[in-house]
Image (cartoon, rainbow, N blue to C red):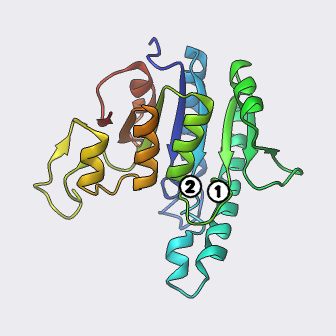
Amino acid sequence: MNPKYRRIVLKLSGEALKDTAAGEPLDSSLLRNLAVELKQIHQMGTQICLVVGGGNIFRGLSGSSSGVDRTTGDYMGMLATVINGLALMNALEKEGVPVRVQTAIPMEKIAEPFIVRRAVRHLEKGRVVIFVAGTGNPYFSTDTCAALRASEVGADCILKATKVDGIYDRDPNLFPDAVKYGEITYIDALEKRLAVMDSTAFSLCMDNGIPIIVFNMNVPGNICRAVSGEKIGTLVK
């Protein structure tokens, strides 16, 4: 396969990494399979950035409903993304893929600080860059982080990996007659309040002309298909 996109940001939800059967926050076999597929993309010549959520460990917004202060909860969620980022780094390195983790919150013992030019240089040298700790600010989601980092490093596309095969007009798990969009504009996604990415992330992508591909990450080979330009999931442009 030949890549359509030279540089991508792959957004992974933390919950997608969860081992639901065992009740563990991380699924080792899923991490291994993901690393193998990312290695294939890396060998195709695509420069890869990863942004991962922390919902499998702690989600700030839901934590606030159980008595945790929203700002404190968001910082806890940011630290959860660091754990997930290190797990992804470990899985990729076991496949022989060079990786650097950059964090928005300084923690020099385990990750580099986020510096745009250093991140771009890593990509140019063929290293996968994993961005953790979100934007470093509360009240901003990891979706917004993905849109921001994609804008900063000049990514050609954001791949939003989810548990469903695209964007629907309503929740397909609750409504069997839900209609899937093949393509949709940023404006329509915002006006319809489609809960795939938050409005800040959509707006950033719209302002900077970054397309978003929403697809099911649980189908083997889907990431490669998306990078190669095959029509899968939903394209937001």
Of the pair 136 and 52, the residue shown nearer to us: 136
Q: What residue does disc 2 label?
A: 53
Of all residues shown, which one is farthest toward the left?
177
**Residue 35 sits above or below residue 12 on the image:** above
Point 70% across, 19% down: residue:
124
Of all residues shown, which one is farthest toward the top?
2
Q: Give the image location of residue 208, x and y in percent.
A: 46, 34
- How crowded is the residue under tag 1: few (<14 C-alpha within 10 Å), some, or many (20+)? many
Of the pair 90 and 204, the residue shown nearer to us: 204
Q: Give the image location of residue 87, x and y in percent.
A: 69, 49
Which label was assigned to residue 81? 1
Residue kind at label 2, given as amino acid type? Gly
Q: Give the image location of residue 232, x and y in percent.
A: 30, 31
Quadrant (top left/top right/bottom left/bottom right) for the N terminus: top left
What secondary structure is found at the residue carrying circle 2?
A: loop
Q: Give the image location of residue 121, x and y in percent.
A: 75, 24
Question: Picture quarter containing residue 193?
Answer: bottom left
Task: Report if the CB atoms under discs 2 and 1 are less than 8 Å apart.
Answer: yes
Of all residues shown, which one is farthest toward the right?
109
Looking at marks 2 and 1 on the same chain, the residue that comes earlier in the sequence is marked by 2
Residue kind at label 1, given as amino acid type? Thr
Point 60% across, 17% down: residue:
43
**Residue 15 sits above or below residue 93 on the image:** below
Quadrant (top left/top right/bottom left/bottom right) for the C terminus: top left
What secondary structure is found at the residue carrying circle 1?
A: helix
For this view, does 197 lie left or right of residue 153? left
C-alpha gap between disc 2 and disc 1 = 5 Å
Question: Picture quarter containing residue 229?
Answer: top left
**Residue 124 sits above or below residue 97 on the image:** above
Of the pair 188 and 91, the residue shown nearer to us: 188
Point 39% across, 39% down: residue:
206
Q: Is residue 73 visible?
A: yes
